[in-house]
Image (cartoon, helix red, strand yellow):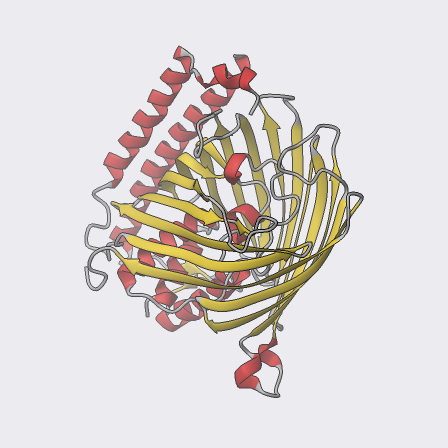
Amino acid sequence: MAKHFLVLSILVLAIGVAFLASAQDRQVAKSSAAIAPTTGAASAATGQPVHDSAEERSEGEKRFKANCGRCHMAPQKFPPRMMATILRHMRVRATLTDEDTRLILHYMTE
Amino acid sequence: MDPAFAGGYRTSPLQRLALALILLLTFASSLCAQSEDSDSQRPVPIFSAGMGFITPFQGGQANLDPLISPIFLVPIGDRWLIESRDTFESDFSQPPGSNTFHGVIQKEVDYLQLDYIANPHVTVTLGRYLTPFGIFNERLYPIWIRDLQSDPLILPISTGPSNASTGAMFRGGFAISPKVELNYATYYSTLITVSPVDSDRSAGARVGIFLPNQRLEVGGSFQHLLEDERSNSFGFHFAWQPPPIPLDIRAEYARSRRGSGYWVESAYRLSQVAEAEDFLRHVQLVARIQQFFVGALPSEVLPPANTQEFEFGLNYYFRDNLRLVSSYGRQFSSIGNENVWTVGITYRIVTPIGRAEGN
């Protein structure tokens, strides 16, 4: 019983933290949006923000090969609304980071 | 499943309260998130299916194994996803003296889960999900992905009935530095004895370190079984794609009280061979070695004796979603050695449910 209580308490606490973090992220995103219309990605090679679309595409291709290519061949490109769903699925399945997901989506929908 | 533990399916008031809190918090978060990105490209529900027809020959006995795994992905709002995968498969075999093949269709709910992307680093999953122990079960299992059609011998270790768990899971990934990423999954599963959604009561976690520039991942898994012998099990995984060549190297090790073992697999695409490039770039060569050692406790799903196996595969990709697969292997164990052949075809479809173009 004590073990179950501990496990369930951790789950509840973790969801609470996730909720708070989510709210905080939204607040930060709104602030960022007020400052700049788009938020650049961090380049995996340099750690510097990626502002240029061509650079984002290149970074997206690189992350696609590094993350998706680990398990399966490159699929054909699908329409953007399908890719958005597939990337959401793969974000969960392959534990992609937020940046990986965004850049790969950008690359796959160009 | 031990019938003595069937009573564990009942939940206590405390568990029900905790579950209610989890649901309340999760839905509260979602309501706050629904208004975001209303003008962005909205994801569309998708139907996908992996299917195949495999003919294994084991110990001189031919079987016919058709399989289909329908997948539904239903995104809701900006942060939610309902996803499910079922498997319908059969193992038709020829009884002695018979000219026809007989078999029954087996049904499994691989996963039926609700995902909530809470923030860039945390995704909450509720429902039935693939047990995140090692990497094969979650990432390499689908018939259209796996390079060799037979399961690794150690796959049943700590993955539970049908390789799935039922409960809650937290998972995600983030960059530790520009060159290092960390991914994690931690979960709690409850006991369910009703097939095809049965699961063990357990808690566990998996952590991986990924170096994207080197395309190298190493990680470990841990699980504590909260029923039966209440034992611990652990495992390690390794995956590497050397960037200059089309080579995949993967390996897993797992240890529990019911058995232990490892597998190492490499797969090489002949896309860099200059001669007959149009043909050879579709060809993949695969090799796998594996060993299993029986544990202190018996198991119905693991080999009954110490076993070694090597296997070679030859796959031909017509397209990224259609391929011919074949393999030859030999299994060595104290209860007899035997050859294992497979030939077959695998295919995967993806189609939107609704309008896929535009917003």
Number of numbered discs present? 0
Q: Is residue B230 left or right of residue A95?
A: right
Residue B178 in percent (x, y) is at 53, 57
Q: Is residue B3 left or right of residue B219?
A: left
Of all residues, the one furthest to the bottom in this rendering is B275
Residue A74 in percent (x, y) is at 46, 67
Q: Quadrant of residue B279?
A: bottom right
- Residue A38 visible in the current orientation: no
Decide which of B145, A79 is in the foreground and name it: B145
Residue at x-position 41% and y-position 24%: A12
Of all residues, the one furthest to the front in this rendering is B97
Residue A66 in percent (x, y) is at 53, 62
**Image quadrant for the C terminus of chain A?**
bottom left
Residue at x-position 47% and y-position 40%: B171
Vertical comparison of B192 with A82: above or below: above
Vertical comparison of B193 with B243: above or below: above
- Residue B45 visible in the current orientation: yes
Residue B202 in percent (x, y) is at 55, 27
Vertical comparison of A13 with A87: above or below: above
Decide which of B176, B286 is in the foreground and name it: B286
Q: Quadrant of residue B352?
A: bottom left
Residue at x-position 35% and y-position 55%: B48
Decide which of B60, B162 is in the foreground and name it: B60
